[in-house]
């Protein structure tokens, strides 16, 4: 007797094996859409046979062998291959491939290379960012189309179409199934990292009432990041991204208050931060730094997160270091949001007047015109300087700009406190 | 994503105080690498044979030093994994048992992680 429903057991095996299966098949058939179809065929066969026969000893090898047989069947029926000879050639290749894998199971490294190639093509710049995300969740995180739709609060048909189109685009663009090298590698790797971080942030933006699938995107992203770190262990930014996600994830319990409201970082109960995530994050950051990647954009953001993680309470925060890290981040690519964060850190480290000077320089920045954090940060600095009349106006401006009701209340309270200080 | 703790009970090798064979160590190393690369392994380790039991009863807390000879009291290694479902954790536990030889593993969900 088994304690688990056979279909759920198959589903579990599928989640473990599917990415490697699809990756290996893509290498053989050179088309990710066909590879996924073949993998699905193998899954259907498993659902038919395993409840009777039991899960085979090596389910991954079973699925791969079944999918390869289907590949040969399809090849024989394929009308697009008009020349018989070409068809025969591919068939021989496949059979050879199968014979090889029977004698010699592919080693971990070969499988890893295929997985890495699959990650690179599903995050290929020829695809729109939202298509990269959907395809990656589908092929590498083994999420179903329905699960992705639920996580992104979109109709299933939208996601299904996105995935179909993405696969078609890859086929039409004849995107090679390879790990890019040379100067292309950096750009392509940063596309992969961006996709993973987009998934993470989507999950991080979820609120208490959201579907668990949506909250789970954080863990899906973390898992993808950890997988990537195993596949490309010498790339410092991969570890930087993992570090950033681990440390942010460590706060997930503390950042939601009892009535579902967002609790800001400095107000969080640090006792509720997850020490396991923090230590994994700090270890990943150390790897990134040891590989010479301390100044990469993800490693820098992780280093900032680490400053907070290391501080036992908010007052212990090393703001001078945080300000320096924002300096380095701004050097990589100037951004008004980074500049505002730097100003806040400078204000905390070197006094409100120094911070205010930087914030004022951002006053005419068009991209921050409706960004409520700007007046709210300015209000905070003015309040600390005892300039209550101006501070009150800034808090009220911020309250009018924010979409978040809880935050609006908070800003109004602060405006009222300034009003009381004046009288 | 749920977390599960898996640990060995009734660890006869620990009871007999026999170190694992090099072949088993190699297999185990491969599995640990595989679970790390799958992005699911959060922490793992072997447990030493000498345990200490700390018991509480009413207001009294008593400490009993090992070694304990009952094999069912002996735990071998442990792994903390982060996976999609209980079934996935069980699948990994099965893969562990296939190389670990005779014995028993317990898989339990960890709450509050």
Image (cartoon, coloured by chain):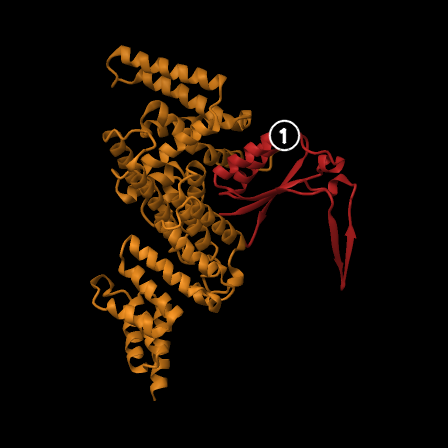
Residue A419 placement: quadrant:
bottom left
Q: Position of residue A200 (x, y in %)?
A: 39, 49
Q: Position of residue A417 (x, y in %)?
A: 37, 81
Question: Mark 1 falls on what kind of element?
Answer: helix
In percent of the image, x 28 and y 44: which residue is there? A129
The residue located at (42%, 55%) in the rendering is A303
**Chain identity of mark 1:** B
Q: Report x, y in % for residue B30.
A: 55, 32
Q: Is residue B15 above or below residue A382?
A: above
Chain B's shade in the image? red
For the point 40% across and 61% down, the residue is: A322
Q: Which one of the lettered chains is coloured orange?
A: A
Q: Is residue A41 left or right of residue B69?
A: left
What residue appears at the point 27 percent right and 31 percent down from the top-left corner?
Answer: A175
Compared with A122, A319 (above or below) is below
The answer to whether residue A41 is above or below residue B89 is above
A35 vs A96, nearest the viewer: A96
Q: Pick whichever, A328 or A55, lies toward us.
A: A328
Taking the image as drawn, is residue A261 in sight?
Answer: no
How many discs mark residues in the rendered view? 1
> Residue extending furthest bottom?
A423
- For label 1, the residue is B24
Q: Is residue A150 visible?
A: yes
Judge from the rendering whether residue A146 lies leftward or rightward of residue A282; answer left or right: left
How busy is the neighbourhood of tag 1: few (under 14 within 10 Å), some, or many (20 plus)?
some
Residue A32 % position (x, y): 33, 30
Q: Is residue B26 left or right of residue A360?
A: right
């Amino acid at each position: 007797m088994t304690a688990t429903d056979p279909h759920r057991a198959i589903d579990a095996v599928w989640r473990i094996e599917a990415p490697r299966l699809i990756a290996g098949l893509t290498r053989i058939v050179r088309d990710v859409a066909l590879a996924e179809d073949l993998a699905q065929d193998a899954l259907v066969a498993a659902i038919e046979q395993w409840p009777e026969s039991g899960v085979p000893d090596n389910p991954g090898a079973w699925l791969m062998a079944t999918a390869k047989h289907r590949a040969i069947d399809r090849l024989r029926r394929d009308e697009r291959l008009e020349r018989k000879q070409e068809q025969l050639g591919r068939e021989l290749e496949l059979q050879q491939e199968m014979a090889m894998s029977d004698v010699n199971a592919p080693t971990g490294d070969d499988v890893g290379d295929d997985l890495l190639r699959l990650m690179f093509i599903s995050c290929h710049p020829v695809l729109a960012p939202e298509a990269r995300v959907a395809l990656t969740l589908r092929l590498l995180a083994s999420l179903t189309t329905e699960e992705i739709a639920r996580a992104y609060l979109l109709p299933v048909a939208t996601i299904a179409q996105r995935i179909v189109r993405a696969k078609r685009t890859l086929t039409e663009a004849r995107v090679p199934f390879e790990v890019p090298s040379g100067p292309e590698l950096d750009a392509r790797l940063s596309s992969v990292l961006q996709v993973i971080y987009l998934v993470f942030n989507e999950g991080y933006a979820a609120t208490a009432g959201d579907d668990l699938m949506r909250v789970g995107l954080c863990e899906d992203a973390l898992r993808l990041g950890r997988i990537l770190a195993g596949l490309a262990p010498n790339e410092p930014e991969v570890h930087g991204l993992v570090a950033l996600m681990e440390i942010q994830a460590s706060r997930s319990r503390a950042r939601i208050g009892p009535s579902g409201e967002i609790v800001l970082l400095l107000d969080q109960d640090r006792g509720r931060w997850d020490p396991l995530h923090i230590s994994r994050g700090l270890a990943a950051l150390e790897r990134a730094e040891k590989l010479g990647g301390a100044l990469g954009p993800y490693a820098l953001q992780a280093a900032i997160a680490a400053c907070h993680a290391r501080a036992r309470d908010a007052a212990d925060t090393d703001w001078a270091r945080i300000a320096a890290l924002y300096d380095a981040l701004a050097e990589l690519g100037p951004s008004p949001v980074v500049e505002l964060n730097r100003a806040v850190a400078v204000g905390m480290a070197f006094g409100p007047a120094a911070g205010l000077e930087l914030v004022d320089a951002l006053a005419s920045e068009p991209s921050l015109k409706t960004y409520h954090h700007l007046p709210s940060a300015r209000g905070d600095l003015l309040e600390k300087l005892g300039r209550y009349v101006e501070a009150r106006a800034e808090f009220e401006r911020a309250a009018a700009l924010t979409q978040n009701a809880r935050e609006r209340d908070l800003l109004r309270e602060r405006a009222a406190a300034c009003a009381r200080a004046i009288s | 994503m749920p977390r599960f703790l898996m640990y060995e009970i009734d660890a006869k090798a620990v009871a007999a105080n026999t170190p694992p064979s090099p072949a088993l160590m190699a297999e185990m190393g491969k599995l640990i690498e595989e679970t790390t690369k799958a992005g699911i392994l959060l922490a793992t380790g072997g447990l030493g044979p000498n345990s200490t039991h700390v018991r509480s009863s009413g207001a009294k807390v008593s400490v009993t030093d090992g070694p304990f000879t009952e094999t069912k009291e002996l735990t071998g290694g442990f792994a903390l994994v982060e996976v999609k479902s209980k079934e996935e954790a069980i699948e990994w536990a099965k893969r562990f048992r296939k190389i670990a030889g005779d014995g028993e593993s317990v898989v339990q969900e960890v709450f509050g992680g």
